[in-house]
Image: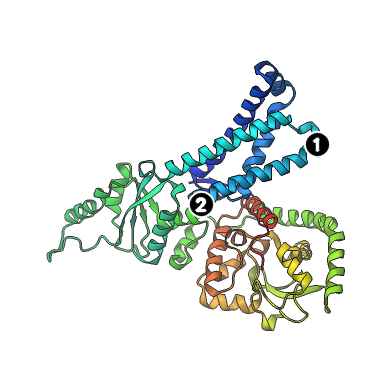
Amino acid sequence: MIRLLNAHFPTRTLFLGVSEACLVALAFIAATIARLGANDASIVLNYEQGLLKILVVSAAFVTCMYYFDLYDSTILSNRREVVTRLIQVLGAMCTLLGVVYYVYPSVGLGRGIFLIGLLLVALLLFLSRRLFLILNTLPQFAERALILGEGEFAESLVSELQLRNELGVRVVGHIKSLEGRNGSGHLASQEEESDEVLQAIVPYRPDRIIVAMEDRRGKLPVEDLLKLKSSGVAIEDGAEVYEAVTGKIPIRSLRLSWLLFSPGFRVARPLVTYKRICSIIFSTFALILTLPLMILISLAIRADSAGSVIFQQRRIGKDGKVFTLYKFRSMVNGADQDANHRPAARTDSRFTRVGRVLRRTRLDELPQLFNILRGDMYFVGPRPFVPDQEYECIQKIPHYRQRWVVKPGATGWAQVNRGYNVTLEDNADKLAYDLFYIKNISIGLDMLILFKTAKILLLGRGSQ
């Protein structure tokens, strides 16, 4: 895994993206040479900004492939889905670049070059994905991992690693306990116990050992693991591996000492100042830019149903303080007040005709720009809930109060990774993502979340 913008990305996936960007660029360079000949192609590429135009096309291709989830772990190993989405990418790029070239003819490649390049890109991308699928499933190209520990956390870690071939890790064994392996009644010496532990581990020939023991006191064979580490075997903490792989923190097996001594969970004052200044500047700019749209939405709501245009609801913010959240009303008047709040469903009868469109396009969230300008929220942070939901979660979900150490946000790490929450189990999983954000909070992670949010908004995903 490679750490970028305070998040973790599989090395193979990043390599795939970079290699495909290079393939697209090479395809259009080859198309230019095939169309114009070597001499004329050299003039176009070097003196008529041909290389820059090709780089723009290459970046647009990779971005479009990202927006069609072609670098998502659930899609990478599905051959049929990959082929279908690659065809969609090619169609989307033809449409997009056709519009761009029509509006700005000076940035366009010649029609012949573009057509030849597109055919070469299609061929190279299909071949590269086929090769990636083959190499990704070969066990000899994966590191051998041994899981040490038992319980729900260890089982979930094994499951996550087995589902993600792009991580380049193959689970070769799962040892639940190293205690009582000699089977004899006499008290084993320290040397005998050490030999016993090594005999249990060495046959797996692991490249890395992931310690996922929930209770390590007196059970972790430290000396034996140090011997293995000195011989080249990587020893890793299960919680850190789980965090890197899933983008969330394992709250069910979380220890208070880990919360206390773990790097992170500290919001520096300069970062708070930066986020507040950015909130004021960008919310002001966004309010000015969207004012005409908000006026039209207000008129549509007023014409569609009786009641106020703006829906107000109490939410829990930083340090547990209550504030009033503003949204455009998307339900019939009085349908979702604090006293009778219940999560919205996709076919909820409480939605108005205009409200259904607003929810689907997320335009009902626009008035939250006033909350951001006032300082109730940031653009990025844990999503705020109504008081009754928050207090229920505090009582039933461990460490839930940690969400309150930062201001809530209009979007967040949980929203871009798991979407809408209904049940208590959903909210527990959401907390796992929120704690990851709080632990790794940074400008880079905020930028990544905003980039992912733009993808969700453009594709209309996750709305209720």
Q: Position of residue 1 (x, y in %)?
A: 48, 46
Camera-near label (2 vs 1) is 1
Q: Could you tell me if residue 225 is visible in this image?
A: yes
User: Residue at 74% across / 57% down in the picture?
Assistant: 279
Q: Is label 1 in a helix, a strand or a loop?
A: loop
Between discs 2 and 1, the one toward the N terminus: 2
Q: Between residues 288 and 254, which one lies in front from this camera angle?
A: 288
Q: Residue at x 31, y 48 (%)?
A: 226
Image position, residue 353 (x, y; %): 77, 72
Residue farthest top in this picture: 39
Q: Residues within 10 Å of mark 2 (few under 14, many from 20)?
A: some
Compared to residue 442, the image places residue 176 above or below, namely below
Q: Amino acid at mark 2?
A: Ser
Disc number for residue 73:
2
Callout 2–callout 1 Cβ contact below 8 Å: no
Horizontal and vertical percent for residue 118?
64, 35
Quarter occupied by residue 229: top left
Q: Is residue 241 left or right of residue 116?
A: left
Residue 104, numbered circle: 1
Q: Position of residue 224 (x, y in %)?
A: 27, 51
Q: Which residue is found at the position 59% from the left and 78% from the top?
A: 391
- Vertical comparison of 35 with 274: above or below: above
Is residue 15 in view from this perspective?
A: no
Residue drawn 44% across and 49% down? Answer: 165
- The vertical placement of 14 against 445, above or below, is above
Q: In front: 225, or 99? A: 99
Front residue of this view, candidates 345 and 260: 345
Q: Residues within 10 Å of mark 1 (few under 14, many from 20)?
A: few
The residue furthest bottom is 339
402 sits left or right of 369 in the view: left
Q: Nearer the viewer, residue 291 or 180?
A: 291
